[in-house]
Image (tube, rainbow, N blue to C red):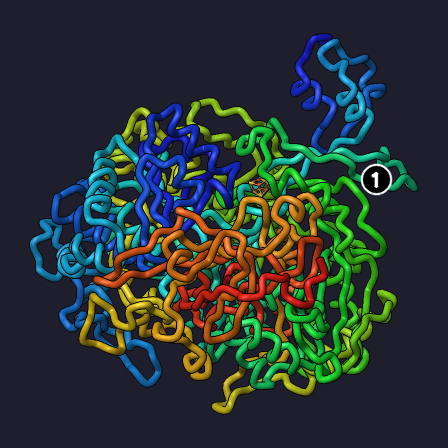
């Protein structure tokens, strides 16, 4: 196994679910791997993911510090195309190639915030305050405006005064639970990016 | 996509129209270059701009934005007039031979049944002639004057090469050359693929543009074959999945539609959707509708969904009209909405007419934002100088902003354009207190449920009874949710023919939608995804990239819907006897006993082809439809209508009918019609587009992308620049009747002036990626300019064709308010 290619090497070390370190595999890399960058990556945890931008959905390899043990915070420091992926075969476009800067963008939101009516600024609030407030506002509006029957007396059970737009870059699982929750409330003003 | 990215390598001809894959989908476009290099494929690009896809094309043709139906209608006319069709395919696999009702008519741009007051059609006459046995009449000789093929011939005979040139501005000789190239794929052994994107969808006639492309492909026998297909290059990474999961105003998961008010009776609701076959022997797979629907209701409401309460039918809202995005923002502007939640969505930038959007959001009582980034929508109330000139003190909307994880910080599946569900894994922790969308929706729901349990309120039943079987109620795992939408047996399932044979144990995951039942014994939250997490585990996480046949079918890589089928309608790649039309690129074939091959057959695996079951098993006809019947809003055949802001102001194809200048059944509200501009004030055609360095309004928050394309610009052709005295690098003001933007002028030879019906028309290109938040230099949201008009079927706004005026700004210093 000493002269395997980098691709084979990564295929073995990265099981897809989680990577393993060289020491865990119990052998040292062959000469083909004796480059500075390879060693840097080989000490990292490798995780498979998909580019969140366009629907080519290029396969990604993400490298992070931290070995997923409890209390260790994993932080991604490098992203590249997954050479095993049948569509992108390791390539990324200028968008996918810069993903590391998306994850670490200074525009990332880090805590819940509140903007009061008429105010020109945010104030920081806790998750508890935020979700309690949203639940209360939604319930008030639903209870006041829910339509059980239309003018003709037909059962319609809908709530039209609150609406939602769902994310089209979030996972199936997020989309599924969002739909389940929103429809149980009787919302019809519900769409996703597909309309645009 | 009917096919998938890798399959593009099998094409003999690639038509890119209404998209620019080289820049917007670069790693997918690689498969076009693969086809060119290894399959001797040729590439045609038709676009208002000589873009980077065009730069590597064999043939490029310019076209006026918004006139693609005139072009494609001209192609249909050429194919029919010159008999460049795959006859066997057209006769056996389409409705060409079906006879249409006698009262169906088309006159000067309007179909029979038009109601001008409601801008809609009574579609009764848009139907086949149906016999006493319930089946449609057909004439396989194609001699009947009202058979679909002859009606089509007649309809598109008006789309002559001269008419194409007048409407589209495409030179006649170029058009002729392209027709001949396209016609060459009518032989069974040649395939063309069509690749399109928002350049077709974002028009007031977008759905019909796509339909028109599909009709070209059906005439050529290019649907269902390897290297062929209608391939939508979808914009966002999971826009396909969210659509499949039904996150649209009037749908449920798996393309099930919600009931109308009038559908009070559950049995009638089911009967309307369990389409009966329109020809003998046809499968008409939607006949299984009740199995899909009941399994969904069981996934959502568990034991509370019973046969007695019609599987909790009344828990679902019924609709009186469509509450699509345009409708909802119009209601919001009129003060009819109180609350709004935006999850990973930036409607201030993404919906048309920013001024209207600001007015609408300002009327809300509360707005909830869930996003990883600082979106413009979340700060619509904040003054950003000229780029968002609002008075915060006058905006009474309460805004709550919640930080959300991004792709790298969560597990889950996304559906790519080729319908592959691919699982991904979390690689890092989110910043600060950010949470996943799943956790937010779960905790919000649990709080609401608790309020309804303790306080009561309006119709609490669907809320308090919602099935919530997750081990940690505030943190359902992606695995739990994926298993739920895939589906499982609720009781022991036995073979109805042999009750001693247990097919599935109670609680076991199901292998596919064929196992779903309508007696409450199965649950599946999205029937088309059934089997994604099957008895063998999570098939979406599979990573075997082997391609044993060499035609790019990696069946063990992830999982694709439906039933892990990679090329939809693949039965149509074989002739009536089950022999592949093109043995070189075989997808499936009949071996005398069953269907075998490189793909999951889109057919019953042991159905003998000679029994006459058609290949389009979802359709009532068993074959593909040229004649859309009542399925489209504006007519059974695509017809050219001008964009709502037209440089002509008339429709050359129906010169004498003022109601048919633009789509007579498009989505437009009265006030928005008044906000339309005319050619006298706004003489240039504008079209929005995307750059390869940016993704919508996200990557201006990403340092590397903000460096590579830092500043807002507009692209104008050299001829217009000369006319207006604009040099490259000058600042210009671009205005529409709804507002203006200011940007740097990029002057190129890529956009040419076009001769439209004797008149010179210039096109202005408007990249969309700037706004007032992020790391790139602040700019104007491009939707400041765009009209609030939508397609009649999808309600998608017309971002790709509208009117503007371009002026040079005398003072060349940067606009005030720029925080550079
Ligand atoms: S890397 Fe580029 S081509 Fe690939 S999915 Fe991302 S945006 Fe699309």
**Residue B502 quadrant:** top right
**Label 1: element kind:** loop
B611 or B500: which is nearer to us? B611
Q: Which residue is mark 1?
A: A74
Q: Position of residue B500 (x, y in %)?
A: 54, 42
Q: Is residue B615 left or right of residue B359?
A: left
Q: Quadrant for ligand 1?
A: top right
State whether residue B388 is above or below residue A101: below
**Residue B343 quadrant:** bottom right
Q: Position of residue B391 (x, y in %)?
A: 71, 80
B407 or B270: which is nearer to us? B407
Q: Count neighbours of disc 1 (C-alpha within 10 A) and say few if under 14, some if 14 to 19, many if 20 or more.
A: many
Please, which chain is the residue tagged with disc 1 on?
Answer: A
Q: Position of residue A9 (x, y in %)?
A: 70, 19
Q: Which residue is rendered at x = 47% and y = 80% of the image?
A: B320
Q: Is residue B254 left or right of residue B105?
A: right
A62 or B775: which is nearer to us? B775
Q: Which residue is rendered at x = 69% and y = 84% of the image?
A: A143
Q: Which residue is rendered at x = 12% and y = 62% of the image?
A: B146
- Asked whether the viewer can see residue A129, the reply is yes
State whether residue A140 is above or below residue B407: below
- Asked whether the viewer can see residue B607, the reply is no
Question: Does ligand 1 reach within 8 Å of label 1's beta carbon?
Answer: no
Q: Which residue is rendered at x = 66% and y = 53% of the image?
A: B700
State whether residue B226 is above or below residue B783: above
B177 or A56: which is nearer to us? B177
Quarter of the image with the C terminus of chain B is bottom right
Q: Position of residue B212 (x, y in %)?
A: 30, 55
Q: Is residue B226 left or right of residue B506?
A: left
């Amino acid at each position: 196994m000493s002269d395997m290619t980098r691709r084979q090497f990564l295929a073995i070390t990265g099981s897809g679910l989680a990577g393993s370190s060289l020491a865990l595999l119990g052998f040292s890399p062959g000469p083909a791997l004796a480059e500075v960058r390879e060693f840097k990556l080989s000490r990292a945890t490798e995780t498979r993911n998909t580019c969140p931008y366009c629907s080519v959905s290029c396969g990604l390899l993400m490298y992070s510090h931290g070995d997923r043990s409890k209390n260790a915070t994993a932080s991604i420091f490098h992203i590249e195309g997954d050479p095993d992926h049948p569509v992108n075969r390791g390539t990324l476009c200028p968008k996918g190639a810069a993903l590391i800067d998306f994850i670490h963008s200074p525009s990332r939101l880090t805590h819940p915030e509140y903007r009061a009516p008429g105010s020109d600024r945010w104030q920081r609030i806790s998750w508890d305050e935020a979700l309690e407030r949203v639940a209360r506002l939604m319930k008030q509006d639903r209870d006041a405006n829910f339509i059980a029957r239309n003018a003709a007396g037909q059962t319609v059970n809908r709530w039209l005064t609150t609406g939602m737009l769902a994310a089209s870059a979030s996972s199936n699982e997020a989309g599924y639970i969002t739909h389940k929750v929103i429809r149980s409330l009787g919302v019809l003003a519900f769409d996703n990016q597909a309309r645009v | 996509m009917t096919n998938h990215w890798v399959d593009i390598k099998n094409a003999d001809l690639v038509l890119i129209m209404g998209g620019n894959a080289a820049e917007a989908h670069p790693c997918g476009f690689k498969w076009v270059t693969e086809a060119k290099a290894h399959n001797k494929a040729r590439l045609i690009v038709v676009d208002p701009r000589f873009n980077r896809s065009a730069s590597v094309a064999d043939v490029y043709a310019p076209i006026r934005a918004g006139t693609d139906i005139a072009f494609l209608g001209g192609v249909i006319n050429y194919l029919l007039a010159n008999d460049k069709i795959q006859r066997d395919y057209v006769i056996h696999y389409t409705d060409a031979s079906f006879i249409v009702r006698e009262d169906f008519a088309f006159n000067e741009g309007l179909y029979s049944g038009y109601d001008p007051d409601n801008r809609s059609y009574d579609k009764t006459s848009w139907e086949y002639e149906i016999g006493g046995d319930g089946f449609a009449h057909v004439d396989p000789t194609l001699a009947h004057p009202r058979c679909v093929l002859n009606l089509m011939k007649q309809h598109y005979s008006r789309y002559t090469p001269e008419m194409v040139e007048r409407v589209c501005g495409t030179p006649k000789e170029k058009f002729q050359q392209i027709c001949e190239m396209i016609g060459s794929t009518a032989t069974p052994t040649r395939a063309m693929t069509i690749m399109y994107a928002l350049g077709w969808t974002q028009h007031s006639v977008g759905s019909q543009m796509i339909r028109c492309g599909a009709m070209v492909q059906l005439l050529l026998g290019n649907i269902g074959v390897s290297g062929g297909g209608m391939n939508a290059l979808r914009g966002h990474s999971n826009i396909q999945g969210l659509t499949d999961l039904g996150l649209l105003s009037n749908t449920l998961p798996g393309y099930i539609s919600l009931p109308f008010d009038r559908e009070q009776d559950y049995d009638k609701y089911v009967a309307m959707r369990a389409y009966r076959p329109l020809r003998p022997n046809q499968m008409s797979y939607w006949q299984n509708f009740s199995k899909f629907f009941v399994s969904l209701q069981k996934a959502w409401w568990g034991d509370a969904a019973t046969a007695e309460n019609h599987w909790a039918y009344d828990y679902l809202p019924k609709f009186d009209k469509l509450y699509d995005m345009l409708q909802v923002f119009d209601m919001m502007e009129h003060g009819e909405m109180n609350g709004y939640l935006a999850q990973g969505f930036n409607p201030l930038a993404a919906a048309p007419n920013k001024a209207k959007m600001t007015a609408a959001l300002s009327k809300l009582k509360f707005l909830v934002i869930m996003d990883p980034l600082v979106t413009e929508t979340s700060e619509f109330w904040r003054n950003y100088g000229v780029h968002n000139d609002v008075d915060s003190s006058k905006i009474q909307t309460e805004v709550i902003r919640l930080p959300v994880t991004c792709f790298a910080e969560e597990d889950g599946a996304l559906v790519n354009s080729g319908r592959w569900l691919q699982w991904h894994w979390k690689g890092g922790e989110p910043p600060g207190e950010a949470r996943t969308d799943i956790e937010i929706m779960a905790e919000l729901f649990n709080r609401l449920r608790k309020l309804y349990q303790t306080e009561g309120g309006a119709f609490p039943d669907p809320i308090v009874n919602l099935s919530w079987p997750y081990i940690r109620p505030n943190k359902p795992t992606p695995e739990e949710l994926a298993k739920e939408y895939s589906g499982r047996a609720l009781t022991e399932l036995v073979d109805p023919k042999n009750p001693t044979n247990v097919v599935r144990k109670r609680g076991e995951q199901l292998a596919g939608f064929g196992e779903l039942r309508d007696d409450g014994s199965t649950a599946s939250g999205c029937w088309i995804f059934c089997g994604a997490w099957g008895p063998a585990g999570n098939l979406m996480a599979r990573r075997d990239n082997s391609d044993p046949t060499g035609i790019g079918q990696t069946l063990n890589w992830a999982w694709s819907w439906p039933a892990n089928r990679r090329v939809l309608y693949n039965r149509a790649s074989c002739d009536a006897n089950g022999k592949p039309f093109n043995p070189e690129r075989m997808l499936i074939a009949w071996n005398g006993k069953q269907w075998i091959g490189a793909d999951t057959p889109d057919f019953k695996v042991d159905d003998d082809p000679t029994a006459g079951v058609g290949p389009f098993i979802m359709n009532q006809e068993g074959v593909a439809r040229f004649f859309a019947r009542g399925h489209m809003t504006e007519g059974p055949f695509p017809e050219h209508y001008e964009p709502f802001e037209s440089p002509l102001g008339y429709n050359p194809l129906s010169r004498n009918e003022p109601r048919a200048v633009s789509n007579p059944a498009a989505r437009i509200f009265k006030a928005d019609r008044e906000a339309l501009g005319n050619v006298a004030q706004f003489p240039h055609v504008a079209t929005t587009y995307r750059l390869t360095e940016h993704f919508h309004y996200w990557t201006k928050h990403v340092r590397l992308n903000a460096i590579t394309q830092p500043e807002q610009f507009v692209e104008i052709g050299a001829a217009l620049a000369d006319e207006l005295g604009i040099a490259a690098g000058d600042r210009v003001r671009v205005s529409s009747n709804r507002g203006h933007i200011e940007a740097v002028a990029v002057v190129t030879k890529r956009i040419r002036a076009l001769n439209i019906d004797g008149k010179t028309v210039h096109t202005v290109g408007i990249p969309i990626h700037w706004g007032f938040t992020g790391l790139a230099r602040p700019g104007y949201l491009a939707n400041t300019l765009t009209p609030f008009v939508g397609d009649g079927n999808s309600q998608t706004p017309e971002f790709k064709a509208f009117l503007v005026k371009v002026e040079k700004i005398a003072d060349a210093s940067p606009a005030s308010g720029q925080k550079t």
